[in-house]
């Protein structure tokens, strides 16, 4: 219960890795704001988590739209009066080789994955500076460090997150705010389940651990950055990838 009394906002928290992060933080006692592009999915997840005894709030939020981000922060401050932990998890892919990549696919990925982190972090820092306390945790990706054919937009957005993490960490370290990132490798999700067996086997060959990670592995790393154990850790990236990049 080390996060009892803390309020955490998770973007894209309705499903996948975001939902696992929400479950992990709830198990440690944090109250939760589940913000997702689909209000209905956010509400469903928030209801599920409320049954574990924490307070929850569901919000409709497209992280790439500044007006929606401002409105979401207004709602969460009205409900909880504080924000201790921001997990910038919302992210999308629009894959294609560079020569064929459409400008709109570049803009959509950068808009949600990178600009969304900027917009939410800016609002969070306003609150956290006043509190003299805050934890911002950004979800990057192994492809920020390795590149990946077909993901020029996605890998650029995730590499951008790493730079943004370090700069924000330096700017607000003296105000009690830490800013860190978690870079997952291949994580078992609906997406990896749907892959053809030969593609799965090819991907597994690149992972020394020999298995895909689980959403819980990512949530555990996020929980470390949210916890008092990491108070003196800022501007860092934890790689959760079974050894495929080190
Ligand atoms: P996911 O299953 O697709 O979940 C992402 C969630 O974000 C969904 O609920 C989605 O809603 C929501 N979302 C999409 N666009 C949004 C927006 N504009 N504003 C707010 N919410 C939005 O993805 P995931 O696999 O859990 O990935 C979570 C994060 O981990 C992402 O940043 C991803 O890049 C990163 N990551 C994942 C892996 C992996 O192997 N899965 C590896 C490395 C990094 P809808 O479903 O309604 O669209």
Image (tube, helix red, strand yellow):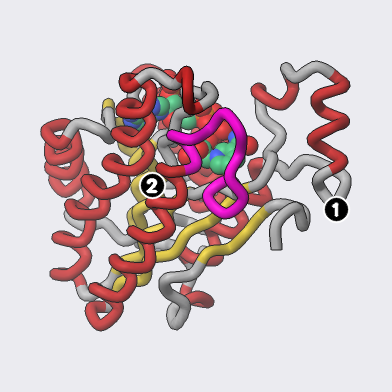
Q: Which of the two labelled residues, at mark 2 and mark 1, occupies the earlier sequence position?
A: 2
> Is 146 included in the stretch rendered in magenta?
yes
The secondary structure that dominates the magenta segment is: helix
Tell me where residue 137 appears, x and y as whole percent.
Answer: 42, 57
Q: Is mark 2 within 8 Å of ligand 1?
A: yes
| Viewer-nearest residue: 34 or 144 | 144
Query: Is 186 positioned to the left or the right of 121 in the image?
Result: right
Mark 2 highlights which residue?
A: 88
Q: From where the camera sits, is residue 51 visible?
A: no
**Is 120 left, or right, of 179 in this rendering?**
left
Choose top left, top right, bottom left or bottom right for residue 199.
Answer: top right
**Membership of 167 in magenta stretch:** no
Using the image as rendered, state which of residue 207 and residue 99 is in the foreground. Answer: 99
Residue at 87% x, 30% y: name it: 201
The answer to whether residue 178 is above or below residue 138 is below
Residue located at (42% from left, 71% from top): 235
Residue 101, x across and y down, in percent: 44, 21
Q: Provide the residue designation for mark 1.
A: 208
Mark 1 residue element: loop
- Mark 1 nearby-residue class (10 Å; few <14, some 14–19, many ≥20): few
Q: Which residues are magenta?
A: 143-155
Q: Is residue 122 left or right of residue 100?
A: left
Q: Is residue 36 above or below residue 171?
A: above
């Amino acid at each position: 219960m080390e996060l009892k009394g803390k309020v955490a906002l998770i973007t894209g928290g309705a499903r996948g890795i975001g939902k696992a992060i929400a479950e992990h933080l709830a198990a440690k006692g944090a109250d939760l704001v589940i913000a997702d592009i689909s209000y209905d999915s956010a509400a469903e997840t928030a209801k599920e988590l409320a049954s574990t005894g924490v307070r929850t709030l569901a919000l409709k939020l497209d992280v790439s739209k500044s007006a929606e981000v401002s409105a979401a922060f207004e709602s969460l401050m009205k409900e909880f009066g504080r924000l201790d932990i921001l997990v910038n998890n919302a992210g999308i892919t629009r894959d294609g080789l560079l020569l064929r990549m459409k400008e709109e696919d570049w803009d959509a990925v950068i808009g949600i994955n990178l600009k969304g982190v900027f917009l939410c972090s800016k609002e969070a820092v306003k609150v956290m500076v006043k509190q003299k306390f805050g934890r911002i945790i950004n979800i990057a990706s192994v492809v920020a460090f390795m590149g990946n054919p077909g993901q020029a937009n996605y890998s650029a957005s995730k590499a951008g997150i790493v730079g943004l993490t370090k700069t924000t960490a330096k700017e607000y370290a003296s105000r009690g705010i830490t800013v860190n990132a978690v870079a997952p490798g291949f994580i078992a999700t609906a997406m990896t389940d749907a892959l053809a067996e030969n593609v799965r086997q090819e991907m597994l060959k690149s992972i020394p651990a020999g298995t895909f990670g689980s959403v819980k592995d990512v949530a555990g790393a996020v929980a470390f950055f949210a916890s008092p154990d990491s108070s003196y850790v800022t501007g860092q990236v934890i790689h959760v990838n079974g050894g495929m990049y080190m």
